Amino acid sequence: MDMRVRSRAPTKITLFGEHAVVYGFPAIVMAVPIYIDVEMETHDSFALSSGPLTMEEFGIRVKGGKVELDERSSEQILRVFSYVMEALKEIGLEGAQVRISSPLPMGAGMGTSAAVTVATLLGGLALIGRNVSEEELANMAWEVEKKVQGVASPMDTSASAIGGVLKIYKRGEWIRERINVKRLPLVVGIFEKAKNTGEIVRDVRKRMERVTELREVMELIGKITLRAQKALEDEDLALLGELMNVNNALLEALGVVDKRVANAVHSALEAGALGAKVSGAGLGGAVIALVERDKAEEVMTAFKLSGARKYFFIESPSRGAFLLNT
Ligand code: PMV
């Protein structure tokens, strides 16, 4: 009998500690209620399709081991395809029809690839009648990401599979700890990205080799992140906002805050945000601003006027990935 499942996985923002986390320092990530949805059906061959993932519709078919792309396909689509294929391989599912919907462009700096991976794994596991814990799902998704990307921190896959707010750091092994946060009002803006994450991480590494003092900037970002954990636990939004501004200044020292992002951050602050920063690799991508609800509209307008392609208001973290009733 053919079976059909629907799964939903949250995307994420990095609240504190991006780039420093590459060197083992702590980062804080939050799963956000902007979701990737996957619909899957058992099938004897494999087919993948999607709604407007980037700006357009696309389709991919595999027939007799050959990949057929429609003309609107692009590198981004192939990326999604690789994650889905690798996820299906991970659980030993040979044929499936997979349909993906995303309200975000891929590669926006919000962990869309991780969410696609997590949702596909969760759906696929349901199809084969296998139950796994959130932690197992997070680990499986991380394995898939590493296979596709070569290297990846477990930040995005953990946030999407487990949900909530997590502190992630490396002590030999990667460690994740849950931080209890009920409410965190934020505006998120998505900007065109000048370079991809891998390139930006490599640029930062080169800069650090020339200016060795930047190692201390990384350390300081780690300290700010620990202080932010405390502010989150104390629900001290005013302090949290200030720490976001400091974190952003340190990211600027690393060279990942360009004119557009700096503009967005300053405009958000002028519009009444408590703090604002890059979220993710920088040079575009996601920018976040901490706001009280009555300032959300103005801050969204500030992001829009600074050139954001999309913007959202989020009040609290999302739970981890889950199945929807079909
Ligand atoms: O922009 P994103 O969501 O790909 O985030 C990158 C975060 C970095 O810390 C810069 C890299 C990483 O692997 O943690």
Image: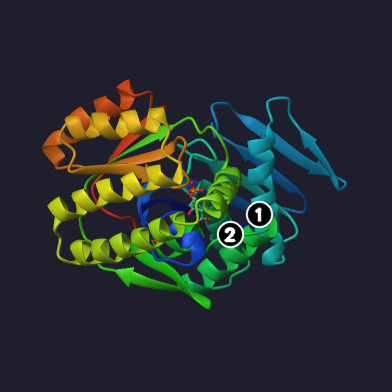
Circle 1/circle 2 CB separation < 8 Å: yes
Q: Can residue 5 be seen in this view?
A: no
For this orientation, the residue located farthest to the bottom is 172
Q: In this view, does 283 lie to the left or right of 42?
A: left
Where residue 88 appears, as percent x and y from the top left, is: 68, 59
Task: Tell me if mark 1 has few (under 14), some (14-19) or many (20+) residues whose alpha carbon lies within 10 angstroms of its own.
Answer: few
Amino acid type at image mark 1: Gln
Q: Compared with residue 87, is residue 258 higher up or lower down, i.e. above or below? A: above
**Element under label 2?**
loop
Q: Nearer the viewer, residue 93 or 262?
A: 262
Q: Nearer the viewer, residue 7 or 36?
A: 36
Quarter of the rendering containing residue 77: top right
Q: Residue at x 20, y 35 (%)?
A: 269
Decide if ligand 1 comes within 8 Å of the CB at mark 1. no
For this orientation, the residue located farthest to the top is 305
Q: How far apart are marks 1 and 2 (CA)?
A: 7 Å
Q: Nearer the viewer, residue 164 or 216?
A: 216
Where residue 184 appears, as percent x and y from the top left, is: 22, 52
Where residue 191 appears, as percent x and y from the top left, is: 43, 31
Q: Nearer the viewer, residue 188 or 92?
A: 188
Decide if ligand 1 comes within 8 Å of the CB at mark 2. yes
Please name the residue that numbered disc 2 is placed on: 152
Q: Which residue is drawn at 18% across and 30% down?
A: 270
Amino acid type at image mark 2: Ala
Please name the residue that numbered disc 1 is placed on: 149
